[in-house]
Amino acid sequence: MEGQFGCPFHVDVDTNVAALGEYRQFGQGAGRFLYLTLSTGMGGGFLVDGEIYRGAGGEHPEVAHQSIAMRCSHPERVVCECGCPDCLEALVSGNGIRRVYGRPAEQLDDAQWDEVAYNLGQGLRNLATIYLPDVIVLGGGIAHGRGERLLRPARRVMREHLKLVPAPKVRLSHHGYDTALAGALIIAKEGLKGQRGRS
């Protein structure tokens, strides 16, 4: 790509890029900033003091592939894209919802949404306990499609089950569907050198 276009070329995980885009405009001041996307799948990007956090060897932490104490009317249908039978992604992502309930998210009834919100809240509890973020921001079609009707009960579940650490703020992405684009523009201008990444 660099040879063809004659300019620097950078690649990163889309949720890292989205986290950077949201943080730069709306999250500065949060020392630990966790961005989650609930869309076709589920993923996340974690920033510490404005820089993308990476695991051993520069690998991307997979926040969606955690097991939770779930509520599900069809537990036999819970199968994650990774092959495991108990990942959070299999319960709250677009593909997971369709597999479990046999219909797209926009067609769920209130009882089914209650299950999704409960499961998301349990996942948020885990992430809050392990990462201790100042704020958790949610983007993607599932999160924005349902909005506060999803986040409000999920926050409640998170708070009810948090016993050892303070509850972080949990809100929707301000950039909406353009969060990753905003991050891509930042990386295009600045590269990834300051992000402990591979460029």
Image (cartoon, rainbow, N blue to C red):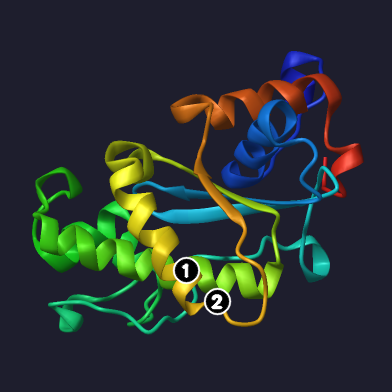
Per the rendering, the mark at residue 181 is: none
Q: Find numbered disc 1 in the image and state the secondary structure of the residue it sits on.
A: helix
Q: Do the residues labelled 2 and 1 touch (CB within 8 Å)?
A: yes
Residue 86 lies, with reference to residue 46, above or below; the image says: below
Quadrant for the N terminus, please.
top right
Residue 55 lies, with reference to residue 181, above or below; the image says: below
- Kindly identify the residue that appears in the image at 12 percent across and 56 percent down: 110
- Front one among 88 and 187: 88
Q: In this view, does 140 lie to the left or right of 116?
A: right
Q: Is residue 196 left or right of residue 109?
A: right
Q: Find numbered disc 2 in the image and state the secondary structure of the residue it sits on.
A: loop
Which residue bears the numbered disc 2? 162
- Kindly identify the residue that appears in the image at 20 percent across and 77 percent down: 72
Image quadrant in which you'd find residue 25: top right
Which residue bears the numbered disc 1? 158
Under mark 2, the amino acid is: Leu
- Kindly identify the residue that appears in the image at 55 percent across and 30 percent down: 179
Residue 155 lies, with reference to residue 195, above or below; the image says: below
Image quadrant in which you'd find residue 58: bottom right
Quadrant for the C terminus, please.
top right
- Front one among 166 and 32: 166
* Label 2, residues with CA under 10 Å away: few <14, some 14-19, many ≥20: some
- Kindly identify the residue that appears in the image at 35 percent across and 43 percent down: 148
The image position of residue 114, as x and y in percent, is 22, 63
